[in-house]
Amino acid sequence: MVDAAFEQLGFYPGSSRPIIRHPNRHVEDRPRRHQYAIDDSWDEKPRKYVTNGVETEFFTVGQLARALGREAVTIRKWEREGTIPVAIFQVPGKEGDARGRRRLYTRAQVEGIVRIAHEEGVLHERRRSFATTEFKARVLELFKKTT
């Protein structure tokens, strides 16, 4: 932190470099980085596909992330690390979209992951580490039951 006297001078002591204050660098004005809010509207626009002759609602990584109060990149990371199983259902991306296939989760999978996360305490402000919970095993069991 710069002393107020030096700030009035406009230079650091022993330097000709001016003190520059950027308005976007005041930490107290910035929102906290990891304030997650669970979005209850995650299921407003399900994708519907027919699987085994039954119309089923599917939800994207982004919708699962909103249900958990996280970012989609976090869900993809959890999948890569094996915290949650790889999405069983996938559809191709839009024509010309180089990003590949889209992961889809059923309503039962999303609601189950959210329920398990709450029960295991991994979503709370003082969240528990995945290593100290049964989250991975329970979600894996959930995916086995819902396929």
Image: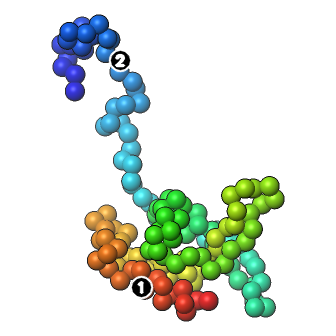
Please tell me which of labels 1 and 2 falls first in the chain: 2
Image position of 17 with respect to 125: above or below: above
Image position of 20 with respect to 72: above or below: above
Q: Which residue is mark 1?
A: 137
| Image quarter in which the N terminus is found | top left
Image position of 117 with respect to 17: above or below: below
Colour mapping: rainbow
User: Residue visible at 73% across and 71% down?
Assistant: 91
65 or 132: nearer the eye?
132
Q: Where does the image place residue 70, in percent across and percent down from the top left?
A: 47, 62
Q: Where does the image place residue 29, in percent across and percent down from the top left?
A: 35, 36
**The residue under label 2 is which amino acid type?**
Ile
| Residue 137 falls in image quadrant | bottom left
The tag on residue 49 is none
User: Residue visible at 77% across and 84% down?
Assistant: 50
Between circles 1 and 2, the one closer to the viewer is 1
**The residue under label 1 is which amino acid type?**
Ala
119 with respect to 71 (left or right): left
81 with respect to 19 (left or right): right
As helix, strand or loop, the secondary structure at mark 1 comes to: helix
Q: Where does the image place residue 131, in percent across and percent down from the top left?
A: 31, 75
Q: Which residue is mark 2?
A: 20
88 with respect to 72 (left or right): right
Task: Report crowding for label 1: few under 14, some 14 to 19, many 20 or more residues within 10 A (C-alpha).
Answer: few
| Residue 4 falls in image quadrant | top left
Q: Is residue 8 visible from the viewing direction of this image?
A: no
Q: Where does the image place residue 18, in percent across and percent down from the top left?
A: 32, 11
User: Residue visible at 36% across and 47% down?
Assistant: 32
As helix, strand or loop, the secondary structure at mark 2 comes to: loop
User: Residue visible at 30% across and 71% down?
Assistant: 128
